[in-house]
Image: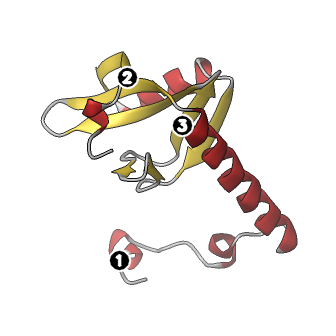
Amino acid sequence: MSCIEQMKYDLLLERISFKEAREYIEKNSDEVYYVNPGYKIFKDYYVIGVPPVAIGAKGEDLIFTYVKPCHGTFVMKIKSPEEIERLREKEKKKVMESLKKGGKSDDAAESPAASYQDLWKK
């Protein structure tokens, strides 16, 4: 797909904050996964948001945030059992890698950035 707007979707919330979107997804999903901004869904859509970005699954529906420049943040749902399965597999893989490392992620071993500019030095 070249554009999410060409897919069959339902808008659940319109023009809201990232926090409101995350809270809605957490309360209205059977499963919730947290991804970083830039996580790719539907092969060519990058999720935008303030971490942690929640993506939910309810039945066969994927519930996620959609940011449209100049219009704000929306919460949408699209029927996509394939995308939900891919998200589950990625989450399972992430947990298994964490267990192999003794429960510590690479980020936990590093000291936190001292300033905003230190974030961009990495």
Query: For numbered disc 3, what is the local secondary structure?
Result: strand
Residue 20 visible in image: no
> Mark 1 — residue?
120
| Residue positioned 36% across, 53% down in the render | 44
Q: Position of residue 22 (x, y in %)?
A: 49, 31
Q: Residue at x 50, y 54 (%)?
A: 36
17 up-or-down from 34: above or below: above
Say whether marks 2 and 1 touch (CB < 8 Å): no
Q: Amino acid at mark 3?
A: Ile
- Give yes or no for contact between labels 1 and 3 (Cβ–Cβ under 8 Å): no
Q: Earlier in the sequence, mark 2 or mark 1?
A: 2
74 or 52: nearer the viewer: 74
| Left or right position of 56 against 88 | left
Measured Cα–Cα span from mark 2 to mark 3: 15 Å
Position of the C terminus by quadrant: bottom left
Whether residue 16 is visible, yes or no, is: yes
Residue linked to disc 3: 55
For marks 2 and 3, the one nearer the N-term is: 2
Label 2, on which residue?
A: 9
Horizontal side of residue 87 vs 95, given as left or right: left
Work out whether 119 lies above or below 56: below
Q: Which mark is residue 103?
A: none
Q: What amino acid type should be assigned to the residue bearing mark 2?
A: Tyr
Earlier sequence position, callout 1 versus callout 3: 3
Q: Which of 34/108 is in front?
A: 34
Specify few, some or many for label 2: CA neighbours under 10 Å numbering under 14, 14-19, or 20 or more: some
Between disc 2 and disc 1, the foreground one is 2
Above or below: residue 93 compared with residue 117:
above
Q: Secondary structure at mark 1?
A: loop
User: In the rendered structure, which amino acid carries the disc numbered 1?
Assistant: Trp
On screen, residue 103 versus residue 18, left or right, reads right
Q: Helix or strand or loop: what does disc 2 sit on?
A: loop
